Amino acid sequence: MIYKQMEDVQQFDAFVQSHPYSHFQKTAMWGEFIQKTEHSPYHMLGFYNNQNELVATALILVKKTLFGHYLYVPKGPCVDYKDQKLTNQVLTLLKEYTKKNRALFMTIDPNVLRMERDIKGNKIEHGENNEFVTEYINQIGFKHRGYTYAYDGSFSNRFTLITKLDEPIETIFKGFSTLRKRSIKKNHKFHLYTVEADRSEIQEFVRLEDDLGKTKEVIRHPLSFYEAIYDAFAGHVHFYKTILPMESYLSVLLDKTKSDNPKEASSALKHYQEALKLQKEKGNNPILAVGMIFDDGHVSYGKYYYRDHAIESLSPLDSLLFHAIQQARNNGHKAFDFLGFGGLTTPHDWDIGYSLYQYKHQWNATFIEDIGQFDYVLNPTGKRALELSNKIKRKLQTLFIKLHK
C-alpha cells in the first residue's frame, strides 16, 4: 500500500461521503473551514492498494504552536475499521507521515462505536462491541486516551445522541418525549414555521448566540465564522430559521381570551399584550430560532442552533429541529446526530453536558459512545508543554467569558 497527497477535492469528498465511516469532519469542506477560521492548513491523503485503487482517505489538519506543530485527523482516517489488516496498513503509513513531517504528535479520534448502550447508558447485553478496534490501534503505537468522560480535554466529544431515521416520520414522532411532542403541537397551533434561509440572514446566528452568552458561558463567534461554514459546505449545510407570524399568533391568542375558562382567558390576555409589544419591537415575522445543519450524504448533524427567548411560552427550537429531522429523512439520511454531550445520564456538579443530555435524549434518541482519542507521540516533552499551555488558555478563556457577560 502507498499514500499520495490528493489534489482533487471532489474525488476526496466523494469517497468520504460514500463510505460507511463517513463524517462531515472528514471532508475537505471541513478542512477549508478550519483553514479559513483557524489559519491551519490541511492535507488530503489518499491510500491506494496494489491495484492503485483508493481504499482509504485522511484529512490532516496541521496545527502550529509555539512548541512546534502537530497533526490532527478529525474522526480518524476514513477506512473500514472492521478490516484490521487494512486499518493497520493505513495507520502505519500515518505514523511514517508524522515522522516525515517532524510533528510533535498525531491525534486521531475514530468515529467507531465502542459498544451498544440503552438511552440511560447501560450496556446492552449481546449488543455490538468494537473494543477490539481500540486494542489493535493501541498495539500499532497509537496510545489510547482512555474511556473517559467529556469534557476531558480531548479534541472532540466521544459521546453523542442520534435519532435514527429508518421508520416513518409518524413513528419517529411518537418516540419523542411527551414534552417535545406537546411543544411541537403547540407551536403548530400558533403557526410557527421553519424554512431555509440564505447567506444574508446569517447575522441572526450572531444575534442569538450573543443573547445566549449573556446568561451562559459560551464562546461567541463573529459573523465571518458562520459565513465561512456556509461557504465551505455549499450544498452540504442548511441554514434554517423558525418564524412566528405575529398576525396569526395574535389572532389565536385573541380567540383564547374569550374562553369560558377564566384561567385560560387570563393567561391568553397576558400573552396577547406581550405579543403586541413584541410585534412593535420586532415586526410581523420575527425569527425566533436558527439552526445550521451539516450533512455528509448519510447523516445530518445539528451543530449550531439557538433560540430567541422573547416568548418563553413557546419553544421555537423544537419546531426547527423537528423540521430538520424531517428534511434529513426526506433526503434519505439514516440518522440525525445531535453532536455531543458529557456522557453521563445523571447529574454531576462537574458535568456541564448533563443539560444537553436532558434535552437531546427526548428526541427518540440512541446513545452513541465512540472509542475515543489516540495519540502517536514523537516528542513527549513538547506535547506536555502544549497541553499545559492549552489548560491555562482554557482557564483564561472561561474567566474572560465570565467577565464579559
Image: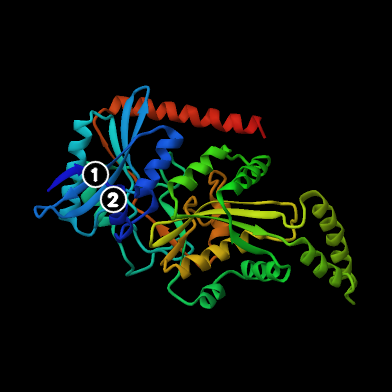
In the rendered image of this protein, does residue 152 appear above or below residue 315? above
Mark 1 lies on residue: 6
What's the residue at 16%, 50% (across, down)? Answer: 48
Q: Position of residue 109 (x, y in %)?
A: 33, 47
Whether residue 223 is situated above or below residue 358 in the rendered picture: above
How are the colours assigned in the image? rainbow
Left or right, 97 with reference to 353: left
- Is the residue under label 2 in contact with that under label 1 (CB below 8 Å)? yes
Amino acid type, residue under disc 2 in the picture: Phe
Question: Counting other residues with Cα less than 10 Å from the Cα at mark 2, is it few (<14), some (14-19), or many (20 or more)?
Answer: many
- Asked whether the viewer can see residue 59, the reply is yes
Ranked by sequence position, the earlier of labels 1 and 2 is: 1
Question: Residue 202 placed where, x, y %?
Answer: 59, 47
> 266 and 38: which one is in front?
38
Task: Locate residue 368 relative to residue 274 in the image: left or right.
Answer: left
Is 290 on the left-hand or right-hand side of 366?
Answer: right
Badge 1 element: loop
Residue at the far top in the pictured view:
66
Residue 297 coordinates in the image, percent (x, y): 38, 61
Let me know if residue 362 appears in the view.
no
Q: Circle 2 is placed at which residue position?
A: 12
Which quadrant would residue 218 be assigned to in this image? top right
Rendered residue at 85%/66% (across/down): 268
Q: Residue 273: x percent and y percent?
A: 87, 58
| Kind of residue at disc 1 | Met
Say few, some or many: other residues with alpha carbon within 10 Å of mark 1 (under 14 / 14 to 19 / 20 or more): some
